[in-house]
Structures are given as structure tokens and as C-alpha cells.
Image (cartoon, rainbow, N blue to C red):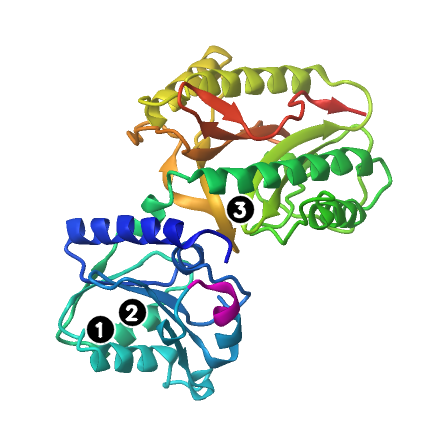
Amino acid sequence: MLFTKQEYKQRLNKVKKSMQEKGIELLISQDTNNMNYLTGYDAWSFYYSQCAIVHVNDDEPLCFVRAQDAGGAYIKTYLKKENIIVYDEKYIHTWPMHPYDSLINLIKKNKWDKLNIGVEMDSHYFTAYCYEKLKQGLPNAKIKDSERLVNWTRLIKSDAEINLMKGAAKISQIGMKVAMESINPGVRQCDAVAEIQKALFKGTPEIGGEYASIATLLPTGKGTSASHLTATDEKFVEGEATIIELSGVNKRYHCPMARTVLLGKPDQKKIDAMKATNEALDAGITATKPGNTADDVAQKFWAVLDKYNIKKESRTGYSIGIGYPPDWGEHTLNIYKGDKTVLEPNVCFHMIAVMQFGDWGVEASESVRVTDKGSELFCNFSRDLHIK
């Protein structure tokens, strides 16, 4: 058990309070991150149906998993054995049978089939088929979107969660150092990423790493004008820049970081763009303090870009914490103009500045924690354009 039972109880109570406010009596949470948050469950089983089930009056959630994964639930969760509910293998890829048939039977057995049921309509692994099964199987229930209520509960981290993120940050720094050492003219991109991944998994002598919820991103050359490109077997070229975005992971908690390296002679336009990028990041980070909003941070960030006549349409940050594929964002707070989410101590976000200029670009980012009086950075690694 990663956290104390008291911490899990506090999380559950916050979720149930939010359920009451939204008129939800039963919550079905299939978001892998939320399952982990509510129960401690952690396994690579999210590619098929599983969920945490919260009744507004119960003292523990239920963990609903495939029978093959029950052993992992017994090991990883804090739940009593009777609250780990398994469904039979006969439901696996035998359409029109589906695991949600078993879930519906469970809901009916517990006489929950006339309740107001909240579901995570935009969760990555809550499919249209899952939704249709619930609608057809529970005609007397009122099924509504839970509006990411568990995600929002996760926004403010406990001190224990912060400590795990600090461990992840140490691994991020190691991975980025290896990236800067490994990226050289004539080296294959995939070979550099192999070294990066080795470092991220190896971690520190005290903290072992884990798989990240997003692959190491490595756009290079013209690819720096695009987003979310991964490594190929092509070689790095002298005179070109490469963006590295990665994250160390500690017990599923992430601390992402992005930096840019230039191979060859200094390029003044890239140097100037990186300086403006860092100035904008610094302005946003300085505005990060309790009581300010995500919009306040965004306004300061974009004011610098406006000064340099740099156009950026995409958001420049999002909340972070627990992460499973395909994303390490929490799908709540955005550092973007108009987001009025109030910052509170232990809110954590990835502030990422992606600057693209036609056929080239630069990028840098920081994982930021709101503190009692301001903010702090999880990582300590130069954001300057790294010129080799």
C-alpha cells in the first residue's frame, strides 16, 4: 500500500462530497489514474474494462477487474477482499457479451439500478460500447457525466504525493542529462532514445524509474516545427536542433521536462527565440502564487510573447500528477487565457512553451508546484538552448 489508509479515506470523502454536490449517488470511474487514486490499483490492465465504483454512502470503493487481474488488485489496493469484484474470462472479446454485462448484474444485485449514476464520459477507456451497455442494461437509472469530479479532486496534492513527484523530478534530470550527451551528429535517433529510456528506468540508487505515460518525444530538424513526434532510425544532423520532452516516473507520479539542443554553430534566431521563451516562462512562473488564477499566469506569459511578436495558439500548461498511457495530464486546470481556476498550495502543473516558426522551433518547460507563498520548480536543469 503506497499511501496510508487515512489518506485514501480523505480522498474518498472528498470525492463523495463532490458526488453529493452534483447529485450523483453512484460513480463509475474507469479513468486509470482515478482508479489508482481511489484504490491504489496499479497494473497494465487498462486496455480492457475495469473501474472503481463509489457509492455515496459506502466506506470503501469497489475495484471491478478482470479475473486474471484479481491477484494484482489484492496486492496493490488497500481494499478489503470482498470489495474487489472480478468478472469472468467469458466476457473477454466475445461480442456482444461484454464486461459491462457483469457490471450491470452487480449494480442490479446491489439494488443500485434506479440511482443517479455518474460516468466519466470523456475518459480514454470509457468507450461508446460501455456507455451503450449501461444505457440498455440500466433503463431505470439516470446516467450522467460526472464532469471529471475525481480528476478535480486530484488537483491539490498531499505532501506524500509531492515527495513522490520530487523523486520523479530527480529521474527527469538524469534522463535529460543523458539526452544532451547522447544526441550527436551521425547518431540514430532511436539509439539516443535507447540511452534516455535506460536512464529513466534505472532512476537513482534510491528510486527506480518506471514507464512513462507518454513516450519520449524527440522532434528534430524540420520536425521541431511540429508537436509530439517520436524518434525514428534517422540520424541527427549537424546544424539542426532537437527538442526532447520526457518525464521521470516515481510510483506513477510524473514530472515532465522539455529542453532544446542545437548541433553545430550557434544560430542567433534560435538563441533569441529561446531567450524569449524563457522570459515568458519566467513571467508565468513569477505569477504563480496562491490566490492567482491560471488566467493570471497565462496573461503574464503571453504578454512577453506579444512583446516579441511571437504567436502561440496552444495552451501553455496543464495540471500533472498520476499518469498512465496515453497522457500525463490530469484533464483539469489549463494554463490558458480565460481559465479562472484558482491556484492553491500543492497544485502542480507542467508549464510548457512550444514555439514553432514554419520549418523550425524551440521548446522548454518546467514542472511547477504552487507553494504557500509562491511557487517552486521540481527540476533544476538549464533551460538555455544547449549548443553542441
Determine the residue positioned at 17% across, 53% down: 20
Task: Assess disc 3: are there few (<14), some (14-19) or many (≥20) residues with their C-alpha within 10 Å of its C-alpha.
Answer: many
Q: In screen coordinates, is 160 left or right of 23? A: right
x, y percentage for residue 42?
51, 61
* Side (left or right) of 297 relative to 73: left
Q: From the viewer's perspective, is 55 left or right of 196?
A: left
Instruction: Tell me where residue 169 appears, x and y as whole percent.
Output: 61, 36
- Confirm whether the magenta stretch covers residue 149: no
Q: Position of residue 383 (x, y in %)?
A: 64, 23
314 over 30 or under it: above or below = above
**Residue matched to label 3:** 253
Location of the C terminus by quadrant is top right
Residue plotted at (58% across, 44% down) = 228
Rendering coords of residue 335 (x, y %): 40, 30
Question: In the image, what residue occupies the spot 28% across and 76% down?
Answer: 133
Give the amino acid at mark 3: Tyr
Residue corresponding to mark 1: 135
Kindly report the distance in space between the C-alpha atoms of the residues bearing marks 1 and 3.
34 Å
The extreme right residue here reads: 186
Q: Secondary structure at mark 2?
A: helix
Q: Is residue 304 above or below residue 249?
A: above
Q: The disc labelled 2 sits on which kind of residue?
A: Tyr
Which quadrant of the view contains residue 186?
top right
Q: Which mark is residue 131?
A: 2
Q: What label does residue 40 carry, if any?
A: none
Q: Are marks 1 and 3 in contact (CB under 8 Å)?
A: no
Residues tagged 2 and 1 counted as in contact (Cβ below 8 A): yes
Position above or below: 322 against 317: below
Q: CA distance from mark 2 to mark 3?
A: 29 Å
Q: Give, as a single range, the part of the protein colored magenta.
A: 73-78
Q: Which of 132/33 is in front?
A: 33
Front of the two marks 2 and 3: 3
